[in-house]
Amino acid sequence: MRIVCLVLLLAASLLAESVAGLKWTAPPGWKSEGARPMRAATYVIPPANGDAAGTECAIYYFGPGQGGSVEANLQRWKGQMSGADGKPANAKIAKQTIHDLPVRTIDTSGDYAGMGGPLAASKSAAKNYRLLGAIIEGPEGNVFIKLTGPAATVGANQHQFEQLLNSFEK
């Protein structure tokens, strides 16, 4: 039994990814597409029943002291979702501690306008989207995690998102 546990721990550590003095393990079923510009990792998630498109979970790290404040990022993410009235959608923002790491989370739904700006692929809002986000204060700077996509697909993956957050450790 000890050997089996040791092999499983070794396999999990090999699958773990890391940045900013933190490591994590992606949930099963999330396909890693590796790092991209400005991203430490990108995971592709298949669509839930009824959704035409899947989604992705991106993990960003910009360096120590980079990427803006926790509060500014939460407000920016909140502003990317609008309600039926065109105003920023309501958002649940919470604080928690995971493995002695301060974490702020956001959960919001509505029409997703995306990143915006001149490099944005589309200027129109995607209807019925959901955003789950987290900012983990790591030893070498903040790590930003964002899962955005069709509401049903994001909802079907909320447990996996929480599993991802809970896997972060120094």
Image (cartoon, rainbow, N blue to C red):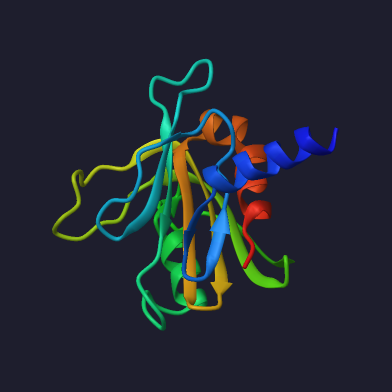
Inspect this view and state whether residue 5 appears.
yes
Horizontal placement of 98 versus 37: left or right? right
Q: Residue furthest left?
A: 118
Question: Which quadrant: the N terminus?
Answer: top right
Which of 134 and 29 lies nearest the eye of the viewer? 29
Where is residue 157 drawn, in percent x and y?
Answer: 59, 34
| Image quadrant assignment for residue 148 | top left
Q: Quadrant of residue 160?
A: top right
Mark count: 0
Against 99, is 65 above or below? below
Where residue 111 sits: x, y (%)?
41, 43
Camera-nearest residue between 109 and 154:
154
The residue drawn where x is 74% and y is 42% is 6
Left or right, 67 with respect to 105, comes to left
Residue 69 x, y percent position in the rendering? 46, 79
- Horizontal side of residue 160 vs 41, given as left or right: right
Which residue is found at the position 36% from the left and 79% from the top?
66
Q: Horizontal and vertical percent for residue 79? A: 42, 61
Q: Residue at x 28, y 51 (%)?
A: 36
